[in-house]
Image (cartoon, rainbow, N blue to C red):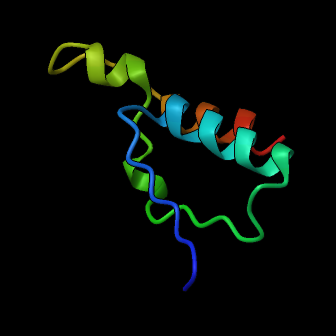
Amino acid sequence: IDELLISQPDTGEQALEICDTLVRSGAVDVLVVDSVAALVPKAELEGEMGDALPGLQARLMSQALR
């Protein structure tokens, strides 16, 4: 491996924005997301324990993959 870029963003939105930027720029040939389950939406991270936030991650992924 000559060059390997590693990013560990704080939120799922940040991660997907980085992915979008890299893909659109043509700066990378291959992009790997190691854990879709780790792409936690900002609202979930900032919310309180027990908050009902159904479908946030699903919506985040749906928007990103369009």
23 relative to 53 in the view: left or right: right
Please count the marks in the image.
Answer: 0
Quarter of the image with the N terminus is bottom right
Q: Position of residue 35 (x, y in %)?
A: 44, 61
57 relative to 45 in the view: left or right: right
- Tell which of 39 and 59 is nearer to you: 39
- Tell which of 61 and 12 is nearer to you: 12
Quarter residue 40 falls in = top left
User: Residue at image x 74%, y 62%?
Assistant: 28
Q: Is residue 52 above or below residue 11?
A: above
User: Residue at image x 54%, y 61%?
Assistant: 33
User: Residue at image x 79%, y 51%?
Assistant: 23
64 relative to 34 in the view: left or right: right
Task: Specify whether residue 50 is in view.
Answer: yes
Task: Specify whether residue 53 is in view.
Answer: no
45 relative to 1 in the view: left or right: left
- Tell which of 3 and 28 is nearer to you: 3
Q: Position of residue 44 (x, y in %)?
A: 34, 23
Q: Is residue 33 above or below residue 51?
A: below
Q: Residue furthest front?
A: 2
Q: Position of residue 31 (x, y in %)?
A: 66, 64
